[in-house]
Amino acid sequence: MHCESPIKRRVSRQIHVGNVPVGGDAPIAVQSMTNTDTCDVAATVAQIRRLEDAGADIVRVSVPDMDAAEAFGRIKQQVRVPLVADIHFDYTIALRVAELGVDCLRINPGNIGREDRVKAVVDAARDRGIPIRIGVNAGSLEKDLQKKYGEPTPEALVESALRHVEHLDRLNFPDFKVSVKASDVFMAVEAYRLLSRQIEQPLHLGITEAGGLRSGTVKSAVGLGMLLAEGIGDTIRISLAADPVEEIKVGYDILKSLRLRSRGINFIACPSCSRQNFDVVKTMNELEGRLEDLLVPMDVAVIGCVVNGPGEAKEAHVGLTGGTPNNLIYIDGKPAQKLTNDNLVEELERLIRRKAAEKAEADAALIARG
C-alpha cells in the first residue's frame, strides 16, 4: 500500500482552467478531446458527459468556424467539466467563444495573424480570466523553421514554441501553458526537456497521433513516463485512435503507475502460469469490467498461486492468492477468509466494494478532521 511518489516535480507557475488548477503543486490533470461534430450539440454533450464520468479533468473541443462557436456555447451550458476551445487562424472565433464562457483557448498566436488580432484575443482572455494554451506540433511547423532545420527536430519545436511565447510576453500575458508534441517519442521527450528549462509556465504533455489503442498506449506510456518520472508535466492527453474515454483510462493508469494520481483501483495481477489455482486472466477481465465505477483509490492484488501471492496480497488493501484446496483473501494485510473457485468473482467483487466503502468513509473523516 504505497502512498507518495518519489518524483520531485518541476516548479511551474499555476494557472486555472475553469475550476481546475494546472501547475504549481496541483495534481497532474488528465484531459481528452471530443471527436464528434461540434455542431452536433447532442452528440458532443453526450460524449463529454461520458468523459466526465470516466474522470476527465479537462476536455478540448475543436471550433473550426463560427457555427461551431455558437454550438460550443450551447454545449458549455450543459456540461460541468472545463472546456478548451481548439482554434486556428480566425481570431474572431476566439473572441466569440470567450464571450460564451470558454475555460481555455488553444491557439498559436503566430497563426492568428496581425499583432492587433493577437492583442484582441489576449485582451479578451485577460478580461475574462481565461488562460491560453500554445500548442506546437511537429506536423505543422512554420515553413521557415522547416527550411532552417530541414525536418522536424526538438530544437525546431522549441523555437516555434518560444516564438509564440514571445507574442504573449510582449503583451504581458503570463497565464498560459505550452505543448510541443511529436509522434516520435524521442523528439517529443527532448523538446519538452529543452522547453522545461526555458519557461516557467505549465507544460501539457502528449505524444501526438500516437496510434491505435494498444500501440498508442504503449508509445504514450513510454514517452510520457520518461518525462513524468523526471518531474516534467502538468497536464496530459493520451492521443489514441480510439474511444476518447480510453484516453482518460490510460492517462490515469500512467499516473497511477508513477504514484502521481490515485483514482480507482490499482490492480496487481500475475500473468498466470501452470501453478495458478484459478483462472487469473478471466478473473481479472471480469473484475476490471465490474469495478470501473469505483473511484476510491485502493490496491487490489490478484495472484494465482502461493509463490508470490501472499507477499503481494499482504501489501494490498484487498488481496487474493491462489491456494489448495481454497484460495485465501487478505484484507489490509491480514488473512480474512477462504474462497473456493465457485462464485469467486462475485465474492471478490463483494469484498472489494465493502472495503472501498469503508475506505471512502475513513478518507472522508480524515479530510473532515483537517
Image: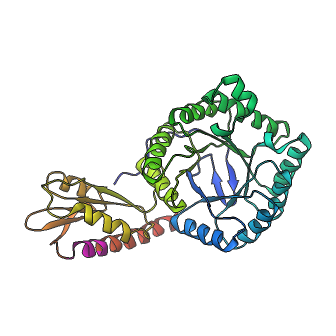
- What colouring does the structure picture have? rainbow
Query: Which sits in the foreground, 209 or 299?
Result: 209
Q: Main secondary structure of the magenta part?
A: helix
| 358 relative position to 124: left or right | left
- Residue 101 can be seen, yes or no: no
Furthest toward the right, the residue is: 116
The quarter of the displayed image where residue 274 is located: bottom left
Residue visible at 44% across and 71% down in the picture = 293
Residue 153 in the image: state x and y as whole percent. Answer: 61, 28
Query: Which sits in the foreground, 253 or 45?
Result: 45
The quarter of the displayed image where residue 73 is located: bottom right
Residue visible at 56% across and 46% down in the picture = 209
Span highlighted in magenta in the image: 343-350
Furthest toward the left, the residue is: 325
Residue 316 in the image: state x and y as whole percent. Answer: 29, 58
Query: Which sits in the foreground, 241 or 28?
Result: 241
Residue visible at 62% across and 34% down in the picture = 196
Q: Relative to 191, is 44 above or below?
A: below
| 51 relative position to 304: left or right | right
Quadrant of the snapshot with the N terminus: bottom left
Q: Relative to 125, is 170 above or below?
A: above
Per the image, is 109 magenta?
Answer: no
Residue visible at 74% across and 34% down in the picture = 142
Q: How many marks?
A: 0
- Residue 113 can be seen, yes or no: yes
| 190 relative position to 172: left or right | left
Residue 224 in the image: state x and y as whole percent. Answer: 50, 42
Per the image, is 348 magenta?
Answer: yes
The quarter of the displayed image where residue 339 is located: bottom left
Residue 284 in the image: state x and y as whole percent. Answer: 29, 63
